[in-house]
Image (spheres, helix red, strand yellow):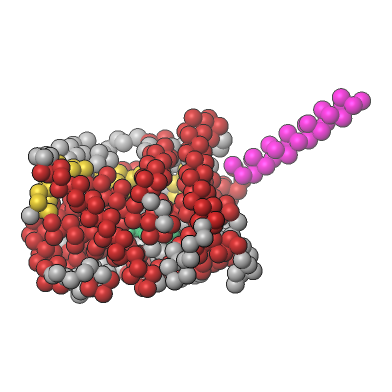
Amino acid sequence: MVLFGILTLLAILTLILLLKLIFSWWISPTQRNHKLHRCGFEGPPPNFPFGNVQEMKKKNGVDSSFGSSKLTHDIHSFVFPYFSRWQNSHGKVFIYWLGTEPFLYIADPEFLKKMSTEVIAKRWGKPNVFRNDREPMFGKGLVMVEGNEWVHHRHVISPTFSPIKLKAMSSMMVESTKKMMDRWTTRINSGNLEINIEREIVATAGEIIARTSFGINDDNARKICEKLRTLQMALFKTTRYVGVPYIKFIDIKKTLEAKKLGKEIDKLLLCFIESRKESKVERKGREDLLDLLLHENQVDGKYGKRLSTKELVDECKTFFFAGHETTALAISWTLMLLAMNEDWQNQLRDEIREVVGDKEVDINVLAGLKKMKWVMNEVLRLYPSAPNVQRQAREDIKFDNLTIPNGTNMWIDVVAMHHDPLLWGENVNEFRPERFMDDVNGGCNQKMGYLPFGFGGRMCIGRNLSFMEYKIVLTLLLSRFSFKISPTYIHSPSFMLSLRPAYGLPLIVQSL
Ligand code: HEM
């Protein structure tokens, strides 16, 4: 009798589990898919349980010589070969599947503008499937939180980027950059002219964010950055089966590696948090991001809610990663483009001489570097550090007789829009910073066709910091060195969450 009872209970539990799985893997995604189909969206046919991931893993159709000899900026079909192929047959808005999750692919700025005006920032979600997959990297940090939680976090963090706080960071940026330059000079003097620019700049940007936002010294910053890089490689070096049910149990080695690295980074950060908590040093007037977060962890703020210790660690991790990689890549791609365009290298040097001269490099002086800003805009157009933006609808979005159903995942292809000749003209793949001379949108004929920092209320919170860091680092570098492409450079911009040079960025660096 007891055995019968247990068996019945087991059978009921199995049935409930089965129904739940059928609902979440089949019924719910299929319903969303049908609704999207009814709006007229098509896409490549998926297969269960992989969706379209198997096709995404193939690199077929890609020009295999791209990486070795040609140095073209026409990179979309190399970075996202599958999207480029599917665009040819399904247009600029279509459905594709990651496992059992349908995604709406968007490379049409007009569509994006109409849709996004219907949604306020706090009503946007981030795809659950990415939130789970990237948990070791971002946890519940600002990049991933939603709703009132997002409002709370963003409100706490925003003051870190006020002009006064930014001004206070500039001397630390100068110091870290000068240290890197002294290392380079030693190498150059010993006859070693080839430097892997990307590795060097990413490391220095890591030191900068560690010192300016968390008061962490260089050795510890290096440890955290190395672990973050390994974590990034584990998660993004290849296209994985994200969205395929139970894939984390099948791809167990990668899952455990990512979890372990995430925990190690948490532990290191927690150590610094604890020592700041115990520190008796007076910090009034020089509070950094860690002080702001700690305050919110210890006192009920305006939102009547404290940040938990996990949220605190997750925010530190998020800012550590987002705060150094993106800016470092923008500077690295800039040096690659300036190495290819000596004329622009000289124009920027002349501007630096005129505007900065012998003055201290600070935020007010930097505002005068107009050409440098055009160059930054153009670099972020051709090689956007963040090559896509993601969203998930948290309610039905209605516009133009269309209904984008609640729960729809969206992948906005920034690389595609930045390289679309219909938006930018025939010279779209040429490096022409002057297109930003009289137009903040670079002459793009659609306002939302240029999105290096995302859009709406969720736009990048760190952009002013990155403008300042970019200008400081570039001013110092161009004042002391000249740059040429190294014959060993392999042009291979690749999607690894950010847009990175897959084989590093060796340049020939000479003292002026
Ligand atoms: C060239 C440098 C940078 C680029 C290209 C960049 C790009 C982006 C993009 C595209 C987004 C997504 C926006 C959206 O979803 O609409 C974003 C968000 C974000 N960025 Fe940046 N970023 C840069 C620098 C920084 C820096 C220096 C920091 C921090 C110090 C930072 C922190 C963040 C955070 C926390 C978010 C999430 C904001 C939110 O969802 O509210 N970024 N960034």
Q: Position of residue 292 (x, y in %)?
A: 50, 65
* Residue 446 in sight: yes
Point out the stretch of residues depicted in magenta: 1-25
Q: Quadrant of the C terminus?
A: bottom left
Q: Residue at x 51, y 57 (%)?
A: 279
Q: Nearer the viewer, residue 250 or 282?
A: 282
**In this rendering, position of residue 509 left or right of residue 17:** left
Q: Which quadrant does ligand 1 occupy?
A: bottom left
The quarter holding residue 160 reads bottom left
Residue 192 sits above or below residue 483 on the image: above
Q: Residue at x 51, y 69 (%)?
A: 155
Q: Position of residue 146 (x, y in %)?
A: 55, 60
Main SS of the magenta part reads: helix
Residue 112 inside the magenta-drawn segment: no
Q: Position of residue 234 (x, y in %)?
A: 42, 37
Q: Nearer the viewer, residue 130 or 101?
A: 130
**In this rendering, position of residue 29 left or right of residue 17:** left
Q: Residue at x 19, y 39 (%)?
A: 490
Residue 357 sits above or below residue 200 on the image: below
* Residue 126 in sight: no
Q: Residue at x 48, y 34 (%)?
A: 257
Residue 12 inside the magenta-drawn segment: yes
Q: Position of residue 198 (x, y in %)?
A: 25, 46
The quarter holding residue 302 reads bottom right
Q: Quadrant of the N terminus?
A: top right
